[in-house]
Image (cartoon, rainbow, N blue to C red):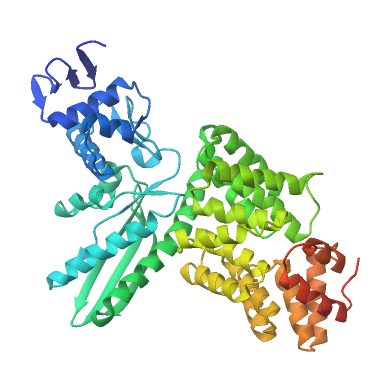
Amino acid sequence: MGSKTTFGPFVLDRERRQLMRGSQAVPVGHRGYTLLETLVDAQGEPVSRETLMEQVWPGTIIEEGSLTVQVSALRRQLGDDAGAVIVTVPRVGYRLVKQPETLPAEVSGPPLIAVLPFANYGNAPEDGYFADGIVDDIITALSRFKTFAVLSRGSTVSLRERGAEVRTAAAELGVRYALEGSVRRVDDKLRVTAQLVDATAGTPLWADRYDGVLADVFSFQDRITQSVAGVIEPAIQKAEIERVRRKPAASVDAYDLYLRALPLVLAPGPEGHVEAIELLGRAAALDPSFALPRAYAALIYETRMSLRVSPLGDRDVETGRELARQALAVGGDDPLVRAICGYVLFRLDNDLSAIEALRSAVRDNPNNVAILTHAAEGVGMYGSLEESIEFHSRAYALSPGSALAYTNLWGLAGSNFALGNYQAAIEWSRRSLATFKDLIYNYVCLAGSYAALDQIEEARAMASRALEINPGLTIKLIEDGAAGKSDPFAAAIVPWLRKIGFPER
């Protein structure tokens, strides 16, 4: 390595440990120089955060936010004409690329989100503390999600003093999404607004406002945190899926393939299952350490069993089990992976220990809609129907617009039916049908509920609709699917289906 390295208008002078622009030294400081030299020496390869922190702060324990601040400062000092750009590599660290063809916000892989300091429009000093407390709580809640990364508060707090906007955050911090908000106080009332923004385009993806009173300030703060955390993940997931759909097929990576498969996995019907398994298999092959593709592929095999549709091969149950165990082996620290795989293993392997895994996943991230949904389904089939209703209700309340909304509404219907609350089951099934009209479970539940209420004509009409969706559905298939496994809904529905003449085989 020579004593001088040139890139763009800059020269890295290793003997003097300076960054020069022409005859002028660029005041990057000792840490900034060390950081830049480490990235330059990597020759375009990613450098982990741990390596950078050890190089810049040798022998010192520091917060990761200090590195982010140092990178942001270095980006500003290099400017727009550096001939190279420091790119954030999600889940890894940073790299220096010579051509800024890929801006930080467009880096492949799971996205970064920044929770920007909330603006304080109140007059009292405590309003500022309240605003900072909300931001801290939201960051803590979002850090429990593994499908995206959230920057620490130390990485964004300096932006407030400079009045920086969302696009500045995108450029300086390398984020794809930003959450911004404000706190306004009038007498004893508080109003908090929050908005999720596509940081690159500056366009809003979601917004809401919350009203409370000072006397209830702590419970108000908790309510905001839970609501915001619950809605962020589905909103980001939807935006990420749209981003990948616009991306050229030749440039997709493991994360992109996973996102392309996700709508097919979450769809109520089985039509996209074969394509989804192919996409998820490619994702797992590209990144063996990425657990979610295997977890969702395992879920497809369980879903097909629950839908009582034809198997994809001779070893569907075994394949589903193997995929779930592989996913847990590489990603068991992710509560979402534990929730998906716990549910799959409970259903395909009758593994009762998986029920506690579902509950622990909820404890680890009580604001993740997908975790709550899978846990609700698992504990409900285990027989803990009140607990299932609690999880389904929380998931739906957190994000009524998520892709899993119809599932949670159906879950509330099924659990209420198994408890004998037939009118409530009808109401929840109807609401689920308004979200997705072809979910076969709802028609089966409605048929049984009307039969239990002795409304035979309505019951047979719902049964006919279920058979239009799946002409091969029979009582034997329902009983076979539940055989040897906990399924209170299946056990409760069969007598009522027999009452209205549902096909036996």
**Up/down of 45 relative to 125, above or below:** above
**Up/down of 44 relative to 393, above or below:** above
- Which residue is the extreme one toward the top? 2
Q: Quadrant of the C terminus?
A: bottom right
Q: Position of residue 261 (x, y in %)?
A: 60, 47
Q: Can the viewer see residue 236 in this picture?
A: yes
Q: Position of residue 91 (x, y in %)?
A: 41, 40
Q: Nearer the viewer, residue 185 or 38?
A: 38
Q: Nearer the viewer, residue 467 or 504?
A: 504
Q: Residue at x 81, y 53 (%)?
A: 310
Q: Quadrant of the N terminus?
A: top left
Q: Position of residue 276 (x, y in %)?
A: 65, 46
Compared across the picture, whether 476 is left or right of 138 comes to right
Residue 500 appears in which quarter of the rendering?
A: bottom right
Q: Nearer the viewer, residue 491 or 445?
A: 491
Q: Residue at x 23, y 10 (%)?
A: 2
Q: Position of residue 226 (x, y in %)?
A: 39, 67
- Which residue is the extreme one toward the bottom? 454
Q: Can the viewer see residue 403 in this picture?
A: no
Compared across the picture, whether 380 is left or right of 213 comes to right
Q: Residue at x 53, y 40 (%)?
A: 290
- Which residue is the extreme one toward the front? 353
Q: Nearer the viewer, residue 80 or 386?
A: 386
Compared across the picture, whether 259 is left or right of 499 comes to left
- Which residue is the extreme one toward the left? 24
Compared across the picture, whether 431 is left or right of 191 comes to right
Q: Residue at x 72, y 54 (%)?
A: 348
